[in-house]
Image: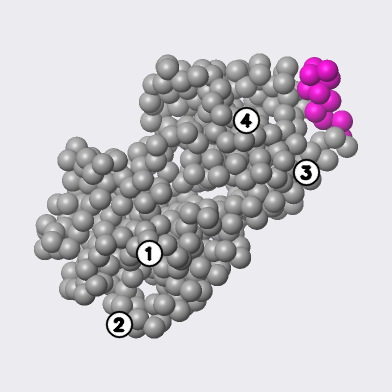
Amino acid sequence: MRIAMVSEHASPLAVLGGEDAGGQNVHVAALATALARRGAEVVVFTRRDDPELARRVRLAPGVEVQHVDAGPPRQIPKDELLPHMGAFAAELRHTWRTDPPDVVHSHFWMSGKASLEAARPLGLPVLQTFHALGVVKRRHQGGKDSSPPSRPEVEARIARQADRILATCSDEVFELVRLGAEMRRITVVPCGVDLDLFRPDGPVAERDPDRPRLLVVGRLVERKGIGDVIAALTELPRAELLIAGGPAGGRLDSDPEALRLSRLARRHGVTDRVQLLGGVEREALPALYRSADAAVCVPWYEPFGIVPLEAMACGVPVVAAAVGGLVDTVVDGVTGRHVPPRRPGALASVIGALLRDPAGLRALGLAGARRARRRYGWDRVAARTLEAYEAVGSASAASGRGRSGREAKR
């Protein structure tokens, strides 16, 4: 099967840790690679943000990344990319007219907009993964939401027009139905985790054995709730907090959120127990996870959340906000604990109880590792994704759609 994967702002080649580089980049790279291992040919289309980039770059066997010229070839915040999606769609249509894929899988709402504009005239089926929904973001961020005002309307149109929507969690299904998507066109396919890299056995980062360690991993943005973890430390007098995220190499002196978190630690009198590590190389993360007594992931909202899966796969219990995809991945009382978002007092109470029960912590960690291995390996996720592709492709062929593209190729 020949797959066109569209990820307009989140290149699978990007360095992680920046404001717009995170879970979607990991998802697209890992899914494309896993699909190729199952015999698919995958081309990932992403916007050119550097004039020196080659038009096509090999990511892995069976996977290439094609850079699309749409707007100036430089870094642009994703919330400012919408005016360039017409040019993005035009180049996709030009490419697919002479070299049509069997299916198009778009990631994020702007990719969905461009993919539908390019694929519909050619009769190509389109599957959509939103990764985040504007209506949810606006609900939780209010005036701090920097998305284009038209985002909810465009997402609703994509939800109605895409041949299939791949929701990443059960909570997203309800949001999609409210947007007008039909239940019969929604399939839940979660994100995955690299089980070869993230595993319980292996090196452990150095730590003080007499001081409980909490770990937060993720982009340094306010909605991730890291400030709530810092506030909770005031009621956890022995615990230390490591924060992995932000610019690589620990260059945090010019990062606004890092500076805000540092001020917050000073205000709460916990500066000596909070360490901002900056961006950590992906290969170094498993040892860091394994050094922690618990991973803490308490965003205000979270469409899915890959960090809890990484921690669970490493055998580390997760304290997670009971929001979005975290309700699916972290089983309360089995692989970790759920807490209400934006409640530092409640967070401190739950963490304190866990730290007083070492045997219970170990049991949660072992259960998390089993759950990650059983349900969230990328090969399993790729198999479920391929089933969705094949169902949509068969329906398209039966209806005669896609014929013009295949004839153009011949």
Write down the quadrant of residue 392 in the picture: top right
Packing grade of label 1 (10 A; few <14, some 14-19, many >=20) is: many
Magenta-colored span: 399-410
Q: According to the image, label 1 marks what residue?
A: 290
**What amino acid type should be assigned to the residue bearing mark 4?**
Val
Circles 3, 4 touching at the beta carbon (< 8 Å) = no
Secondary structure mostly taken by the magenta-highlighted segment of the chain:
helix
Q: Give the color scheme: rainbow, by chain, secondary structure or one colour.
A: one colour
CA distance separating discs 3 and 1: 39 Å
The residue at which mark 3 appears reads as: 390
Q: Kindly report the distance in space between the C-alpha atoms of the residues bearing marks 2 and 3.
A: 50 Å
Q: Secondary structure at mark 2?
A: loop
Q: State yes or no: residue 340 in magenta.
A: no
Q: Residue 154: percent from the left, percent from the top?
A: 56, 35
Q: Is residue 126 left or right of residue 253?
A: right
Nearest to N terminus: mark 2 or mark 3:
2
Callout 4 secondary element: strand
- The one nearer the camera, 235 or 176, is 235
Residue pictured at 62% horizontal, 22% vertical:
92
Q: Inspect this view and state whether residue 185 appears.
A: no
Amino acid identity at mark 3:
Glu
Q: Which residue does the numbered mark 2 point to in the structure image?
A: 356
In the figure, 210 relative to 313: above or below?
below
Seen in the image, is 106 located left or right of residue 217? Answer: right
Q: Is residue 37 visible?
A: yes
Percent x, y of residue 16:
39, 41
Q: Residues within 10 Å of mark 4 (few under 14, many from 20)?
A: many
**Which residue ends up furthest to the front in the rendered image?**
203
Q: Secondary structure at mark 1?
A: helix
Mark 3 touches mark 1? (CB < 8 Å): no
Q: Which label number is shown at residue 43? A: 4
Q: Amino acid type of disc 2?
A: Arg
